[in-house]
Image: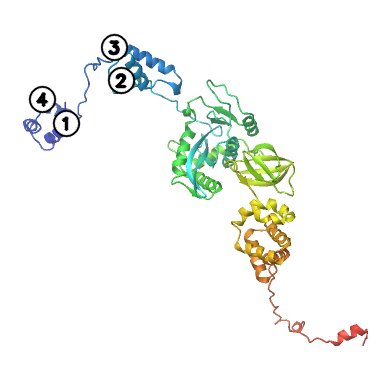
Amino acid sequence: MLNVDQHAAIRYAYYTENKSIRAIARELKLSRQTVRKAIGSPTAPRYTPTRPRSAPKLAPFQERLTELLEEQARQPRKQRYTTHKIYQILAAEGYTGSESYLRATITQIQQTSRRPKTFLPLQFRPGQDAQVDWGEAEAVIAGEPVTVQLFVMRLCYAHRAFAMTFPTQRQEAFFAGHVAAFTFFGGVPHRISYDNLTTAVAPVMTGRTRTERQAFTAFHSYYLFEPHFCNLNAGHEKGQVEHEVGYVRRNALVPVPVVDSYADLNAALHRWCQQEDQRHVTGQPRPIGVMWAEEQPLLRALPPQPFPCCITTTATLTPYSQVIFETNRYSVPADRAVRKLVIRAYPFHIDILADATVLATHPRCYDREQDVLDPLHYLPLLLERPGALDHAKPIQHWQARWPPSYDRLLRRLRREWPDGRGVREFVRVLQLHQHYPPSLIADAVEQALRLGCIQADGVRLCLQQLLHPTPTTVPLDLQDRPHLAAIGNQPIDLQQYDHLVTGATE
């Protein structure tokens, strides 16, 4: 049988080079009948077997193979027979053929028996539907490679998408992604489709019945949207957002972004999502931004206040003026702390409260057994115990990054007042950080060192001078009022003081 190259060579020789059939057959060592068939057929013939290929070693096991394949279809998805396991079973029962032939046979049976998947074309009404999904991506944040969790929500009518990254897929991040997306869209879709996320529902084994988490029930009740959960292993039911996660990763996060913080990364993603309004999605009548303008008025209105996307729990103050959350220790101002406190853990920060008053805010730590300390929280204790300054852990961490002028100031204060007052004066200088920018305080310390006024009051005075420098006076132009020019320049009559002292009058 001719291959494609031979078939093409025959036709080229006959039609282009005008060679005879006899010459072509002689050059290519083919029969003239074969050459005539190639000339008459514009496409190369395909091999079609006239009868099934015999399989003498597998034939006695065909019925058993069918039984195993039927059993495989009924088994759990992750615990089904593999082709190698089927080969082992048949080999134990006497099959002597090759595993590769058995593998090819099973593949052929499955391809011929499996009905191809087909789907209904869908059309969504404006304002009605959105889809949500998570993905992962790589980024470099503050110099460290990080796997970020990518939250994506997409409106089904306008195809407008919102993307945001988080350190985790926990429930508070899940809610925060929704709130940010609703703000970006200017409203709330009437229905949102999800996978069976454990942050929204309890684990699902079979069927369509779902048990929602109470927090998620409170969340969608607050925004008044209807949640819809896909069937198990049916990602195509929310195919728009499945595609969108990959699209965002390939277009907004390539090359791998290098940023200082999650805030910078999310700001860049927000700008990219806005730029996508100019894109015209294939098959859609108008650009994304135009269709979103049609959809936005039909979304549900946002509530007056956003939902609090946090975990709330209680904590007990430790002897080191700290609270413990997820094994990490967060500091509390020593002069304001009470024994029983409340922690609100958001995706990127935590608040520590006494009643309704926020005592401290820290960046949230996702490591374990870490100290997250604000040195300002411990300054009141150092005023009482100045001898602990050199060994105070929060101050040691701060000292590694504060300006060298602070060390010079501390040394001079200790020389001036070695009895502890010098350290207290230094602590009072550090307390200025509660109210003023660090760069301004550093300039004030430098100025105080130059002037020799190294006490806390001296540094505060220099700080006020930097904040409110003495204005320069501009002399008045009195050329058009010559009679006023002598005022303030007339000679002083000292006899007036004598009159004042003696009480004499003229």
Give the Cα distance between marks 1 and 2.
34 Å
Quarter the N terminus occupies: top left
Give the Cα distance between marks 1 and 4.
13 Å
The answer to the question of whether label 1 and label 3 lie on touching residues, with beta carbons closer than 8 A, is no
Q: Position of residue 395 (x, y in %)?
A: 64, 54
Q: Residues within 10 Å of mark 2 (few under 14, many from 20)?
A: some
Residue 412: quadrant of the picture: bottom right
N-terminal of the pair, mark 4 or mark 3, is 4
Q: Nearer the viewer, mark 2 or mark 4?
A: 2
N-terminal of the pair, mark 2 or mark 3, is 3
Q: Residue shown at 71%/67% (left/top)? A: 416
Which is more toward the observer, 316 or 190? 316
Q: Which residue is mark 1?
A: 7
N-terminal of the pair, mark 2 or mark 4, is 4
The three-letter code of the residue at mark 3 reads: Pro
Quarter the C terminus occupies: bottom right
Q: Residues within 10 Å of mark 3 (few under 14, many from 20)?
A: few
The three-letter code of the residue at mark 1 reads: His
Report helix, strand or loop for mark 1: helix
Q: Is residue 100 above or below residue 504?
A: above
Q: Is residue 354 left or right of residue 151?
A: right
Does residue 305 appear in the picture of this structure?
no
Which is more toward the observer, 143 or 502? 143
Q: Nearer the viewer, mark 1 or mark 2?
A: 2
Q: Position of residue 309 (x, y in %)?
A: 63, 38
Q: Is residue 454 left or right of residue 502?
A: left
N-terminal of the pair, mark 1 or mark 3, is 1
Q: Which mark is residue 102?
A: 2
Give the Cα distance between marks 1 and 3.
41 Å
